[in-house]
Amino acid sequence: MNGSVWYLMRASGVVSLLLLTAVFVLGIATTSRVRTRSLPGYAAVGLHRSIALLSVVFLGLHVLTAVADPYAAVGLAAVAVPFLAGHSAFWVGLGALSVDLTAALIVTSLLRGRFGLRTWRAVHWLAYLAWPLALGHSLGMGSDTGTLWLRALAVGCIAAAGGAVALRVWRANRGVKHLRPQTA
């Protein structure tokens, strides 16, 4: 097997992180009901869904190439069972947890009518953990972990996600303040 699988594994991992960050940010934006003139609510939801599907494609490619690459030495079981990998078990385990949460989200979304809104929403909220787990996997695993470009990319992802969370918290607190009784 030549080095192209290794490059594809690295590239698909980075693209997955970028797409998962976009899904994370758009998910928060849609639940916060953030609207712009150029992106109405229904378009934001559609974009969130489309990018989520694209992220699953790249995540699948990343997992397949990690299993196929003999140098990565990631067994098929280590993809689904966290912390089972022999080499870098912790970092691969973070990736496996992220994959498991993403898979649970996919299954409950496909069967949303059978689970009910409350269960689907609980799994969806739990799936937000997939992003920091994927970020941890990215920063701890692989040959690019110490490079400036990956760290800068991670800082950008953290800034985007942190900004979305801060906006969500700010908007939630602002709404709560309006509901509080006024004191003299």
Image (tube, grey):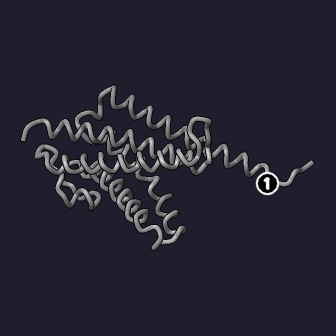
Q: Residue furthest right?
A: 184
Q: Is residue 29 left or right of residue 22?
A: right
**Callout count:** 1
Q: Amino acid at mark 1?
A: Leu
Where disc 1 sits, the SS reads helix
Residue 173 x %, y %: 70, 48
Residue drawn at x 53%, y 45% is 43
Q: Is residue 57 above or below residue 162?
A: below
Residue drawn at x 81%, y 54% is 180
- Where, by quadrant of the figure, is residue 149 drawn? top left
Q: Residue furthest top?
A: 148
Q: Residues within 10 Å of mark 1 (few under 14, many from 20)?
A: few
Q: Which quadrant holds the N terminus?
A: top left
Residue wearing tag 1? 179
Q: Is residue 58 above or below residue 112?
A: above
Q: Is residue 97 left or right of residue 10?
A: right
Residue 182 x %, y %: 87, 51
Q: Is residue 134 left or right of residue 173?
A: left
Question: Which one is in front, 137 or 164?
Answer: 164
Q: Residue furthest bottom?
A: 114
Residue 61 x %, y %: 24, 47
Residue 162 x %, y %: 52, 39
Residue drawn at x 20%, y 39% is 8
- Where, by quadrant of the figure, is residue 20 drawn? top left
Q: Is residue 36 above or below residue 53?
A: above
